[in-house]
Image: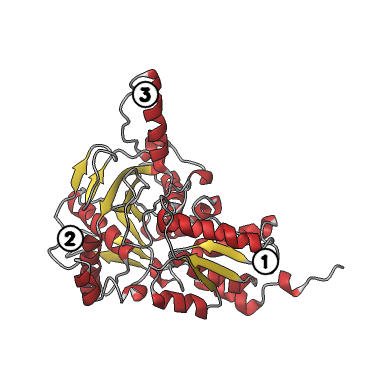
Amino acid sequence: MQSQTTTDITPPARSALSGLVGNTPLLQVSEPLASAGRGFWAKLEGFNPGGIKDRPGLHMVERARARGDLRPGARIIESTSGTLGLGLALAGMVYGHPVTLVTDPGLESSMTRLLTAYGAQVNIVSEPHPTGGWQQARRDRVDQLRSHHPDSWCPDQYNNPDNTSAYTPLALELASELGHIDVLVCSVGTGGHSAGVSRVLQQLYPGLKLVGVDTIGSTIFGQVARPRMMRGLGSSIYPRNVAYDHFSEVHWVAPAEAVWTCRQLANSHYASGGWSVGAVALVAGWLARTLPAGARIAAIFPDGPQRYLGTVFDDDYCTAHGLLGSPPAPEPEVIGRPDEKEVTHWTRCTTVVDPLALSADAGARDTVGPLPEPTAQEPAEAGLSSPEEESR
């Protein structure tokens, strides 16, 4: 019998680490974000060791190893704004791979120290890409580093379908815990968890509505790229894992609105998180106030508050950046098309299209004349996309 090398074996103690991921708690959130007697259910993914992206970190590495794309002991190199870095550091420890994480100066120093403590090498780019910003600069650095490590592997979280399928267990947890779900609220960055969770839940509950939450200055849903303060959601590129046809509507949220909501959550429910959590909770609370009383709303909170003590929960930081002021408006502004205007505060749009497809349509109109205006497509009417079509 052929002997198995130690690099092919996952030690039991390390394998047990993966058992810490999943089965996160569910919290009912009500006043002051929702009206008395109403509320929404928040899935607290911050209770995973590193947050929600422990799930795709482990899953993408496992699948790459099974296919032979990631060889035993080979280096993992990836771009991250922080949370996936924690998941990949965990996966590297579980499966025995060195990990290099490419980030930018916006990453909190506490997160850099934590990633280093977990055994990852942190590589920081110094200048943003002229058009693709820090995100593209990080991806270019990944390509450079991979040229020095020929056997290395990059998960490519923005386009990897395994980033989507990693969230099937999360969807099944929600279904088991809630029994029925009418509305799912997700932040969108790479597109992974919004696609993966909605794909499963829309099969179980065909009428389920998916509401996406983005940050101002993000290109994902067709807005103009601007410098973004909120890490963990939004993008300056167009991730191919975003399943546009799953969404019923999208909301853009500004940093000050997310900060106010995070602090309200912490003060009223002893639970909170970072930028994504604040943005998602703001939108989910509004839905709970405005939808019929019996609507069951689930919101995914990607992380906890710990890494944001120097930003979201720091008065000096928030004052310096103009983030402490009046609460958000009680209702979002509404626009008819994602490219109708540049938004600067909480804004809602019920027409969701792929910006690249919209650009192609615009080019076609210039050639062959006008096309019908795009309309919002309900998830039940759009059908379910394959995993290759989405990711966060």
Q: Does any portion of residue 112 appear in the rendered image? A: yes
Which secondary structure lies at badge 1?
Answer: loop
Q: Nearer the viewer, mark 3 or mark 2?
A: 3
How many angstroms separate mark 1 from mark 2 (CA)? 53 Å
Across the whole image, how many numbered discs are drawn on residues? 3
Q: Residue at x 48, y 46 (%)?
A: 240
Q: With 50 as the anchor, is 369 left or right in this view?
A: left
> What is the CA distance from the residue labelled 3 to the residue labelled 1?
48 Å
Residue at numbered disc 1: 74
Q: Colour scheme of this structure image? A: secondary structure
Q: Quadrant of the N terminus?
A: bottom right
Does dot 2 land on a helix, a strand or a loop? loop
- The CA distance from mark 3 to mark 2 is 50 Å
Q: Nearer the viewer, mark 1 or mark 2?
A: 1
| Residue type at numbered disc 1 | Ala
Residue at (27% x, 37% y) in the render: 337
Instruction: Classify mark 1: residues with Cα within 10 Å, few (<14), some (14-19) or many (20+).
Output: some
Earlier in the chain: of badge 3 and badge 1, it is 1
Give residue 365's mark. 3
Q: Decide which of 200, 61 is in the foreground and name it.
A: 61
Is 40 above or below relative to 12? above
Rendered location of residue 129, percent (x, y): 44, 55
- Say which of marks 3 and 1 sits in front: 3
Observer-nearest residue: 90 or 151? 151
Image location (x, y in percent) of residue 93? 59, 74
Q: Mark 1 near mark 2, Cβ–Cβ under 8 Å?
A: no
How crowded pointer 3 is (Cα within 10 Å; few <14, some 14-19, many 20+) is rated as: few
Residue at mark 2: 37
What's the amino acid at mark 2? Answer: Gly
Q: Earlier in the sequence, mark 1 or mark 2?
A: 2
